[in-house]
Image: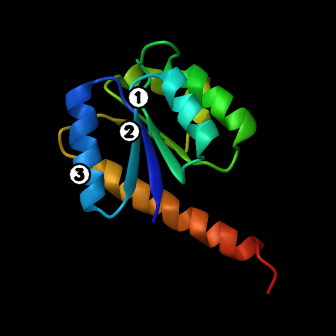
Amino acid sequence: MTTILLVEDDKNQRLLYEQELRLEGYEIVTAADGKEGLGKVQEQPPDMIIMDINIPKMNGIETMGMILSKYKNIPIIINTAYSSYKDNFMSWAADAYIVKSSDLTELKNKIKEILTKKAKDLKQRQPH
């Protein structure tokens, strides 16, 4: 089963995303701030990370930088209420940038697209 780490400080949004993504068949691990998210990645690297930017203890951009310095193959989707961070070149390291919406269709589609691409890339790297 595909494991997704969801780093989101808003409890209600965390519950909504967790519930919606579980219905899609993913195993969801949650963290409420950047430091907790980083710790969960180090304990058990997930298949994908969905991360808010405005989170306590360590913001999403900083957390993403620390994760990618050690785990370059984990796709990260930035999921934030602020479109202004799109211009921050640090956010370009993410595989996708999605502005939060109560409709999770865009997020779900992006997750499938990135995981499909990751699976194809892994398959191509294996010796035939």
- Residue 125 placed where, x, y %? 76, 71
Three-letter amino acid code of the residue under disc 3: Glu
Q: Residue 52 carries which label?
A: 1
**Horizontal placement of 55 versus 63: left or right?**
left
Q: Is residue 105 visible?
A: no
Q: Which residue lies furthest to the bottom in this view?
A: 128
For the residues carrying marks 2 and 3, which lies nearer the camera in this image?
Answer: 3
Three-letter amino acid code of the residue under disc 2: Ile
Q: Residue furthest top?
A: 57
Spatial distance from mark 2 to mark 1, Cα to Cα? 10 Å
On screen, residue 117 above or below 41: below
Three-letter amino acid code of the residue under disc 1: Asp
Name the one closer to the observer, 80 or 83.
Answer: 80
Spatial distance from mark 1 to mark 3, Cα to Cα? 17 Å
Q: Mark 2 points at which residue?
A: 98
Q: Is mark 3 on a helix, strand or loop?
A: helix
Do the CB atoms of the residues marked 2 and 1 lie less than 8 Å apart?
no
